[in-house]
Amino acid sequence: MKLWIKVSLVAVIMVAAAVSICNLFLLVGAGRSNLNYAINSTVSAQKTNAAYWMNAMAEEIKAETGAATARSLARYFVAQLADENIVLNAGTDSIYNATCIEPADYLPLAEGKRQYIIADVAGKSMLMVGSQIAIQGTIYSLYMMQDVTSIYADITEMAYRFSWISFAIMFIAGLVELLLVRKLLKPIKTLKENTSLIAAGVYDRRIRIAEQDEIGELAEDFNSMADAVERRVEELKEEAARRTLFMSALTHELKTPMTSIKGNAQTLLVTRMEEEEREQALMQIDADCTRVEKLSQKLMHLIVLKQSGEIALKEQKTSELFAMVEAACQTQLKNRGLSLTIRNQMDTLSMDLDLLCALLLNLIDNAGKASAPGQTIEILAASNVISVTDWGGGIPESALPQLTQPFYRVDKARSRKQGGIGLGLALAEEIARLHRARLAFESEVGKGTTVKVVFENEA
Amino acid sequence: MKHRWGVLYFVLAVILLFSLFTVPQIARRVLDDTKGKIVTVEMQ
């Protein structure tokens, strides 16, 4: 069953129950009120008539008045009241009765009390009020009667009329509730449709709901969730694309030296060669093996770094770091005819000395490959940034975003010739990430490149 | 679960029938109870 039907049904049931109970109380209340009014007015009339009749009789009846005279006077004074609903009895004898009902049969009066009863007589509901009056030793009973059949009939008729009106109210209320609930729950239907679309892979759908109620908040949360899902899916797609690229690059990087090794080995096996040529082929195989070994080592390093969630950083002096870096790259730079300038304005840094040294050596190696003999590479450490600058060939702006991708090289032929395998900056980026830092590249073709390691938490 | 919510239709039908037929009868019966009883009122 749909939610809007459930809500509407429950609401209609509540309204129907409330209307029914109200009807019942209203009808009973109205009936009692009408009856009380009839009883009070009849009791009041009986009181007035009894007082008048008693006073008149008291004035005329003396001790010596005979019984027949007294009965005549009693009848006369009752007749004077000119009310056809009055009945007068003396003891068990009827003195005056214009009705065809004998009230004493239904209401045997108790002495000194005024009493009433409602009784069904000959298909009518009759209200009878009576009291006893003692005059000169004779007990008179004075009754007044009123037909209240119409009150009962009216209540019955009113009850059925009320019922049909209630039915109409319930029907209209039900219809209104139905429309209202459908309108209120419409945004939920939209939410459901959009959820289905997202489940089917359409991630760019969003919901526009103007209401600021709970459903509006739900829609906002849904949109936030859809944003997060879309973002995550995009990230996964990018990750998958990166992995595919990585695998194809890795395959290519392995295939090149393996092809060379296989070619040289087959040549050595099937061709008669001079000693010098054999030596050259063996040296080529050795160089290719070294390259594959270096590739596997760097890959292992990269994988280990990627798997490390966090490393223990230690507050250390940057002078130690730069001394270590200078010692490690001195020979390499000297062989290339390059010089290194270090300007250290930093005191200490939270770091893993070996890893940060490896990062800087990677950057210096890249700067060395880009520089011409005689040029200088500069390291500047200030504030929260360590930068490595060279004045070499520079990098095209379009290549800057891809520099940290594994196996990406700006100039593939030259890089390979210089022994590069395209993993240096990928490694550097991972090391920077573990130091809560990021790499930033500034470069201009023909003028040089600056690579900055920007530490986020350093002052 | 489906049957449980289906009970709502039954409840609604019962309340409607109660409202249409039982409420008038109850009202009439409550008033009919006032018949046949002798009630004493004060003499003043």
Image: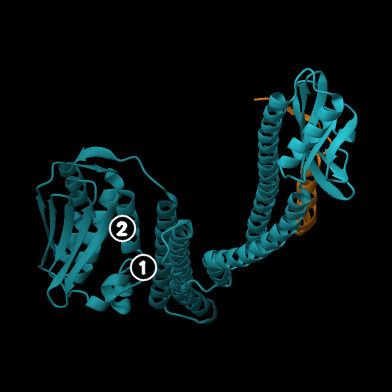
Q: Answer yes or no: is residue A276 visible.
A: yes
Tell me where residue A185 appears, x and y as whole percent: 55, 64
- Give the quarter of the figure containing the C terminus of chain A: top left
Color used for chain A?
cyan
> Image point 88% across, 35% down: which residue?
A94
* Chain letter of the residue carrying label 1: A
Q: Nearer the viewer, residue B36 or A145?
A: A145
Is A390 drawn above or below residue A97 in the view shown?
below
Question: Which mark, by number, is residue A254?
Answer: none
Tell me where residue A273 appears, x and y as whole percent: 45, 80
SS label for mark 2: helix
Q: Is residue A413 left or right of residue A223?
A: left
Q: Residue reaching furthest bottom?
A: A271
Residue at image mark 1 = A405
Q: Nearer the viewer, residue A221 or A427?
A: A221
Color used for chain B?
orange
Q: Answer yes or no: is residue B5 visible.
A: no
Residue at image mark 2 = A428
> Image point 14% across, 71% down: which residue?
A448
Is A266 drawn above or below residue A122 in the view shown?
below
Tell me where residue A399 appears, x and y as whole percent: 28, 75
Q: Say few, some or many: other residues with alpha carbon within 10 Å of mark 1 (under 14 / 14 to 19 / 20 or more).
A: some
> Image point 54% across, 80% down: which residue?
A270
Tell me where residue A356 appears, x and y as whole percent: 27, 49
Disc 2 marks a residue whose amino acid type is Ala
Quarter of the view holding residue A336:
bottom left
* Chain letter of the residue carrying label 2: A
Is A138 drawn above or below residue A266 in the view shown?
above
SS label for mark 1: loop
Mark 1 and mark 2 lie on one chain; the one further toward the N terminus is 1
Q: Say few, some or many: other residues with alpha carbon within 10 Å of mark 2 (under 14 / 14 to 19 / 20 or more).
A: many
Disc 1 marks a residue whose amino acid type is Gln
